[in-house]
């Protein structure tokens, strides 16, 4: 931390407010000489005064300590990146929702086919209708189980375990012991 840089930053902030060292000193209950020492870099404000200075000048304490404002451009870049990540996540979520929608529709059609075949009495043992009803009901339940596993986060946990297993397998046995 360069005290001179902090001092010139404090002076710049004071001038932006169009106040004198004496006026600032009154505001913070310190002497005008103390403010002068801060601005020349021969002395630094106490921690408690840093909080008051940050509030008064509407800057952060790290900005005072660094002796410069954080780049507005950097803040805008961070915001833009966050928005892009949000848009990306929304796109992925929309794709997943569409897949779930179509899987659910197929499962419902299968279950409806089962109910219609059962209700109409076409499910004679060994018939094509009985097999179709069984496939429709089975597929419907499998889809519902898959959806429940996805919504509960079980697929994410399985994927993480599989990645850990693959990574552990990729490290040769001797390399594991060499690290210890």
Image (spheres, helix red, strand yellow):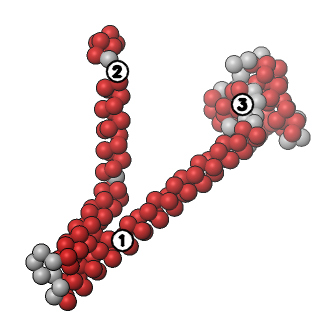
Label 2 secondary element: loop
Which residue corresponds to mark 3?
64
Label 1 secondary element: helix
Which residue corresponds to mark 1?
106
Dot in front, 1 or 3:
1
Q: Relative to 151, say whether 52 is above or below.
A: above
Q: Residues within 10 Å of mark 1 (few under 14, many from 20)?
A: some
Sequence-wise first label, 1 or 3? 3
Mark 1 vs mark 3, CA separation in Å: 62 Å
Compare residues 63 and 72 and report the one nearer the observer: 72
Q: Relative to 67, say whether 88 is above or below.
A: below
**Residue 69's image quarter?**
top right
Compare residues 103 and 150 and report the one nearer the observer: 103
Image point (65%, 36%), residue name = 51
Dot in front, 3 or 2:
2
Residue 171 shows which numbered tag? 2
Sequence-wise first label, 2 or 1? 1
Q: Relative to 26, say whether 142 is above or below.
A: below
Image point (76%, 40%), residue name = 73
Task: Specify the farthest residue to the left.
Answer: 125
Left or right? Give the position of 135 relative to 96.
left
Image point (33%, 13%), residue name = 175
Residue 90, can we see it?
A: yes
Residue 70 shows which numbered tag? none
Question: Could you tell me residue 78's position as x and y percent?
Answer: 66, 42
Label 3 secondary element: helix
Question: Could you tell me residue 168's position as x and y percent?
Answer: 32, 26
Q: Residues within 10 Å of mark 3 (few under 14, many from 20)?
A: many
Screen quadrant of the N terminus: top right
**Answer yes or no: do the residues labelled 2 and 1 have beta carbons within 8 Å?**
no
Image point (15%, 77%), residue name = 127
Mark 3 vs mark 2, CA separation in Å: 47 Å
């Amino acid at each position: 931390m360069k005290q001179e840089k902090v001092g010139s930053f404090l002076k710049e902030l004071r001038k932006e407010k169009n106040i004198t060292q004496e006026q600032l000193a009154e505001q913070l209950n310190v002497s005008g000489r103390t403010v002068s020492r801060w601005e020349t870099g021969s002395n630094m404000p106490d921690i408690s005064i840093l909080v008051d200075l940050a509030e008064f000048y509407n800057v952060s304490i790290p900005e005072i300590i660094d002796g410069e404002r954080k780049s507005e451009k950097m803040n805008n870049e961070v915001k833009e990146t966050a928005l892009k990540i949000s848009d990306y996540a929304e796109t992925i979520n929309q794709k997943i929702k569409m897949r779930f929608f179509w899987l659910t529709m197929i499962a419902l059609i299968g279950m409806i086919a089962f109910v219609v075949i059962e209700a109409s009495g076409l499910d004679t043992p060994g018939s094509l209708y009985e097999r179709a009803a069984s496939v429709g009901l089975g597929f419907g339940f499998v889809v519902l189980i898959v959806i429940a596993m996805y919504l509960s986060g079980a697929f994410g946990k399985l994927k993480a375990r599989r990645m850990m297993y693959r990574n552990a397998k990729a490290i040769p046995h001797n390399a594991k012991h060499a690290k210890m």
